[in-house]
Image (spheres, helix red, strand yellow):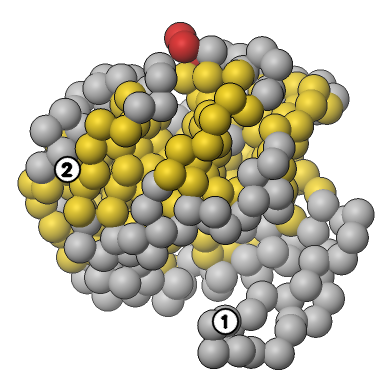
Amino acid sequence: MADADGGRLYLSHGTQVEVLNLRTHQKIGVVKPTPGVHGIAVVPSANVGYTTNGRTHSATLFDLKTLQPSREIPTGLKPDAIRYDAFSGRVFIFNNEGNSATVLEAATGKVVGTVELGGAPEAAVSDDNGLLFVNLEDKNEVVVFDANTLAVKHRWPLGTGQEPTGLAFDQARHRLFSTCHNQQMIVLDSQSGKVLATVPIGSGVDGAVFDTATGSAISSNGEGSLTVVRETKPGQFEAIQTLPTQRGARTITIDPVSHHIFVITADYGTAPAPTAENPRPRPSVLPDTFVLLEYGID
């Protein structure tokens, strides 16, 4: 994740988080151990950050200045996405196998509640006014809940979209962009839940971001591409560009100041044999091939 205020870039990397200077890309340090790290969120006002650790079903609370962990917080099963919501002063951890969100007091890490989502959550966004939106991967819908009361308010189906992962938000125009594994980006009205458009994207999608400078939603596709989607006419959304990246470049973030996009990947070997516990194993990562790719606006 890109922390523009702190001038840092946080990169999930297996069992640790690499911390880089956002402008120079020089390495600042690491946060470790974070077994099976997925998401990172920072709370600058409290000088703390959080990681979600899929292997230990926990979150790590760490100091932003020293990068030293202070404690591990139990979550639901397989915590994945994470979101700091400044409006409520809370951090929301989305438990993919737990079908829930663990809610923390942002400054202290104290668990203050749980949201039962009724499905496997993936990416989430906030409207900065008391509502959070989250994809449910196994239900093909977006759930809307109140950041303060934790009550679920809406469940919006994604039309033909299947297995949604990434979620981007155009707050000014009230648009949600949900990226789905059947190579579709579903555009929703964030006030009504109405499906506004279905746009083809690349395969193996994971994340999505919205660029306010160009008014574009960008999906990161594991096939090795970025799909850039824009509202070309009122109510008409199109994929205006496909940028080549590198195989496996699925995790994405955007710097809201420079509007540069970052993705990470590595070189891959063969996949291990399927097992009952892991019927769809991912290819092995080759040592010392972890790489950061940066894309800017021409």
Q: Amino acid at mark 2?
A: Phe
Give the answer, above or below, for where 84 lies relative to 154: above
Q: Earlier in the sequence, mark 1 or mark 2?
A: 2
Is residue 118 at least partly visible in the picture? yes
Is residue 38 at least partly visible in the picture? no
Q: Nearer the viewer, residue 152 or 185?
A: 152
Q: Are marks 1 and 2 in contact (CB under 8 Å)?
A: no
Residue 197 spot, x, y in % from top left:
27, 61
Q: Quadrant of residue 108?
A: top left
Residue under the image location 58 percent in, 63 percent down: 221
Q: Secondary structure at mark 2?
A: strand
Residue under the image location 52 percent in, 60 percent down: 206
126 displayed left or right of 276:
left
Residue 278: numbered disc: 1
Q: Nearer the viewer, residue 273 or 207?
A: 273
Residue 219 spot, x, y in % from top left:
51, 55
